[in-house]
């Protein structure tokens, strides 16, 4: 008996149609991550907390079609045009999800947001320079100049209202300190606060501290040929004023010299003579005792 190929073809078509009806009507649930974009927020407001970058959406739809949207980048436009300072409850609406009608939104997680909103204010405050470490020992700061000396801060009212100044990032002063030190320094502002400008020019002047020291210096004599000379006293007491860093150095005493030069033809006898004091540059002789010494020439 010969098979009837027309009946076989019809049976295959009917089977394919039935399979399509069954699979096409089968519904499946699929979770998708949807990005949230904030729109319409009023100017002058700041969202302190509660905002999210994405939500999870459970979508129900035909099996074959549902799988096609898993890789699509979907965006939920969250309109914040009605928010006000304080706590605001914002509900996600399934109608705002851009999906074809063949899909059904079953669930949104989270379903709502609780936003803490503050006013955003602006304030002009002075700038304070902060040093990373104290001024190098032996130096005094003569002045600090900041350009500009005040900046504009913008941010949440809760942070801005209590700020009376803004600090710089710590400044490191080299040692030894130069006469003039200049550097551009960034500002140290709290999180969520903007500063304009974000950095300032800092200029500082330094001078060495002065102090006094009293020391005994032996009197150096240069006797002429054929002469023997003694001095009374053999050492003098000197009070010297100068940079504190120099005077505190243990080697400073060796840099001070009291000396007396005599004429080559000086005759034997006793003399009252003045001496000279040699010191490092920047030092000043305040007092010398005695001012003159007694010389005995033989």
Image (cartoon, rainbow, N blue to C red):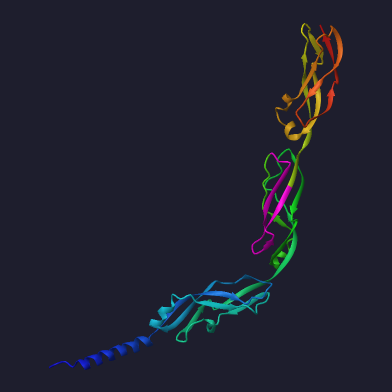
Q: Nearer the viewer, residue 100 or 26?
A: 100
**Quarter of the image holding residue 128?**
bottom right
Which residue sits at x=78%, y=22%?
A: 216
Q: Quadrant of the C terminus?
A: top right
Q: Is residue 202 within the magenta segment?
A: yes
> Measured along the vertical axis of the image, is residue 241 above or below residue 136?
above
Q: Nearer the viewer, residue 56 or 266?
A: 266
Q: In this rendering, does residue 164 appear at all?
A: no
Residue range highlighted in magenta: 176-203
Image location (x, y in percent) of residue 83: 65, 77
Q: Is residue 165 within the magenta segment?
A: no
**Quarter of the image holding residue 212?**
top right
Image location (x, y in percent) of residue 45: 67, 72
Q: In this rendering, does residue 10 appear at all?
A: yes
148 left or right of 81?
right
Which residue sits at x=71%, y=63%?
A: 153
Q: Quadrant of the N terminus?
A: bottom left
Image location (x, y in percent) of residue 222: 77, 14
Image location (x, y in percent) of residue 176: 69, 39
How many labels, in total? 0
């Amino acid at each position: 008996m010969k098979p009837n190929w027309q009946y076989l073809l019809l049976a295959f078509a009917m089977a394919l149609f039935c399979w399509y009806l069954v699979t096409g009507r089968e519904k499946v649930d699929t979770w998708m991550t949807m990005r949230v974009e904030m729109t319409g927020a009023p100017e002058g407001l700041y969202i302190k907390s509660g905002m999210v970058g994405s939500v999870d959406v459970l979508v129900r739809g035909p099996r074959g079609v549902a799988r096609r949207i898993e890789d699509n980048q979907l965006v939920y436009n969250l309109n914040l045009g009605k928010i006000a300072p304080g706590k605001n409850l914002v509900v996600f609406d399934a109608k705002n999800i851009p999906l074809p009608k063949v899909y059904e939104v079953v669930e949104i997680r989270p379903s709502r947001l609780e936003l803490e909103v503050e006013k955003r204010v602006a304030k002009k405050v002075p700038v304070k320079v902060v040093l990373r470490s104290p001024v190098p020992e032996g130096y005094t700061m003569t002045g600090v100049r900041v350009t500009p000396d005040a900046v504009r801060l913008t941010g949440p009212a809760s942070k801005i209202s209590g700020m009376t100044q803004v600090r710089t990032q710590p400044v490191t002063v080299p040692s030894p300190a130069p006469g003039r030190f200049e550097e551009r320094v960034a500002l140290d502002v709290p999180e969520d606060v903007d500063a304009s400008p974000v950095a300032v020019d800092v200029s500082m002047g330094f001078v060495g501290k002065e102090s006094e020291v009293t020391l005994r210096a032996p009197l150096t004599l240069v006797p002429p040929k054929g002469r023997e000379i003694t001095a009374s006293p053999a050492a003098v007491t000197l009070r010297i004023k100068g940079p504190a860093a120099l005077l505190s150095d243990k080697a400073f005493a060796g840099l001070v010299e009291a000396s007396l030069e005599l004429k080559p033809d000086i005759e034997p006898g006793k003399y009252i003579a003045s001496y000279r004091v040699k010191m490092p540059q920047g030092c000043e002789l305040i007092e010398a005792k005695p001012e003159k010494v007694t010389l005995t020439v033989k």
